[in-house]
């Protein structure tokens, strides 16, 4: 449960609304818009984290967005997750790499700045060869595959330090209770106390970024596989040695 490169969480969540009926014989009262408490605020920090992880997994689809600081490197993330599929991007120092995973097949689409910053003398050539196409990754690729783990709930919300329960307050997305992880790399996960116990926000230690989750259960029409004409194998792009 910590903000770090390629293994990060945080969340925004909506709340379920409960209605109240009117008194017999009297004019019906307006339905209450007060969210229904889900009881997580009375649980232990470990139990709260388990509830949040289960809620995120059951949502099937959601969005992760925010900024993080990983070892002094500032990163901006924006991902849409739909089941096992995802579409998103990571931006750092003006360079962006887009990620797409459909049916277990991973693709990347780095921009020119990314290639120039990470491929040395071959960067300009790689950018020219790719253009706007997606690069298909082989199943044995070790350089980029780890980036796709960023949306795995079992990794996003996995604690490494001791957990404690903090205050309950209003955060972006609704009322939430804090689950605090100790240690230099720990963070604070805010979990919704109304409606589904979604993780609403994860804050890194010492102002090292913040990520949010939103759009739980949404249908993302743009999370689809690319056309064959828009794909090139990454292994064929790499200069031969």
Image (cartoon, rainbow, N blue to C red):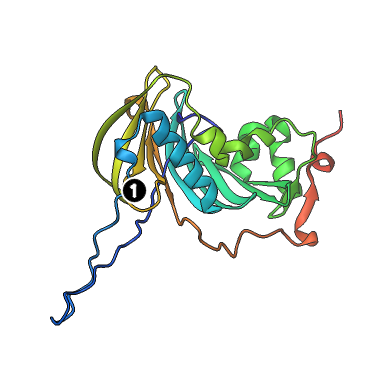
Above or below — where is 128 with respect to 50? Answer: below
Residue closest to the eye, 23 or 114? 23
Q: Position of residue 103 (x, y in %)?
A: 73, 52
Circle 1 sits in a helix, a strand or a loop, which is it?
loop
Could you tell me which residue is drawn at 49 percent across and 40 percent down?
53
Rendered location of residue 204, percent (x, y): 38, 30
Q: Which residue lies furthest to the left in this view?
A: 26
Residue 1 spot, x, y in % from top left: 46, 30
Which residue is at a point 59% across and 41% down the rendered structure image? 113
10 Å neighbourhood of mark 1: few (<14), some, or many (≥20)? some
Q: Residue 74 at x, y = what percent? A: 45, 33
The residue singled out by tag 1 in the image is 38
Is 81 on the left or on the right of 125, as rendered?
left
Q: Residue furthest right?
A: 240
List the single residue furthest toward the top.
183
- What residue appears at the point 73 percent right and 35 percent down from the top-left corner? 122
Q: Residue at x 45, y 46 (%)?
A: 65
């Amino acid at each position: 449960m910590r903000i770090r490169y390629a293994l990060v969480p945080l969340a925004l969540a909506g709340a379920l609304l409960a209605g109240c009926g009117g008194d017999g014989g009297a004019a019906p009262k307006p339905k209450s818009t007060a969210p229904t408490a889900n009881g997580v605020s009375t649980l232990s920090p470990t139990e709260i984290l388990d509830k949040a992880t289960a809620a995120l997994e059951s949502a099937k689809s959601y969005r992760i967005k925010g900024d993080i600081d990983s070892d002094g490197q500032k990163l901006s993330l924006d991902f849409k997750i739909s089941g096992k599929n995802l579409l998103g991007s990571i931006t750092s120092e003006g360079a962006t790499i887009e990620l797409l995973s459909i049916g277990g097949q991973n693709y990347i689409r780095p921009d020119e700045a990314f290639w120039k910053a990470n491929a040395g003398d071959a960067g300009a050539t790689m950018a020219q060869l790719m253009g706007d196409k997606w690069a298909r990754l082989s199943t044995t690729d070790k350089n980029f595959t780890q980036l796709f783990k960023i949306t795995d709930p079992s990794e996003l919300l996995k604690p490494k330090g001791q957990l404690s329960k903090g205050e309950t307050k209003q955060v972006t997305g609704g009322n939430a209770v804090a689950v605090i992880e100790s240690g230099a790399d720990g963070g604070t996960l805010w979990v919704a106390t109304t409606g589904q116990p979604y993780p609403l926000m994860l804050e890194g230690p010492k102002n090292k970024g913040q990520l949010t989750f939103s759009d739980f259960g949404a249908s993302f029409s743009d999370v689809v596989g690319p056309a064959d004409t828009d794909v090139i194998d990454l292994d064929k792009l790499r200069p031969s040695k």
